[in-house]
Image: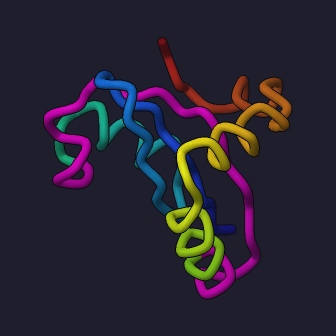
Amino acid sequence: MTFVYILKCKDDTLYTGYTTDLNRRLKEHNSKIGSKYTRSRTPVKLMYFETFKTKSQAMKREIEIKKFSRKEKFAIISKFDKRNLLEYKVGD
């Protein structure tokens, strides 16, 4: 399973990525060993994710979401069932 996710950074910017292990990737981002973008913007908070069977599907969706405006990203975040976040160690 592969995830596409959206993080909210400390400076209120949004970061979109994909991974095969969401908990590990969140820890990496918050430990400043994740992406170059998030290193100076920790802590980050998981706001949204989708799951895919293949890496290819996830990468295509990641590209779609990255093209969204900030308003469009918040629109999909607002429709996301936040109970799904409880499965992941996200912190505040």
Magenta region, residue range: 34-58
Residue nearest the observer in this picture, 64 or 46:
64
Instruction: Residue at 60%, 33% (x, y): give it.
Output: 47
The answer to whether residue 53 is magenta is: yes
Quarter of the rendering containing residue 58 = bottom right
Query: What kind of colouring is applied to the model shown?
Result: rainbow
Is the residue 76 above or below the residue 1 in the image? above
Assess whether residue 39 is covered by the magenta stretch.
yes
Quarter in which the N terminus is drawn = bottom right
Q: Depth check: 36 or 21 in front?
A: 36
Q: Is residue 77 left or right of residue 29?
A: right
Q: Quadrant of residue 71?
A: top right
Outermost residue, top direction?
92
Residue 80 percent across, percent down from the top left: 81, 37
Q: In the depicted view, which residue is nearer to us: 35 or 31?
A: 35
Q: Nearer the viewer, residue 83 or 69?
A: 69
| Residue 79 location (% of width, % of height) | 84, 36
Position of 44 relative to 38 (above/below): above
Q: Position of residue 69 (x, y in %)?
A: 55, 53
- Residue at the bottom extreme? 56
Residue 9 locus on image (x, y percent):
36, 30
User: Which residue is at a point 62% across and 60% down the rendered structure image?
Assistant: 3
Side (left or right) of 76 relative to 72:
right
Classify residue 10 by image quadrant.
Answer: top left
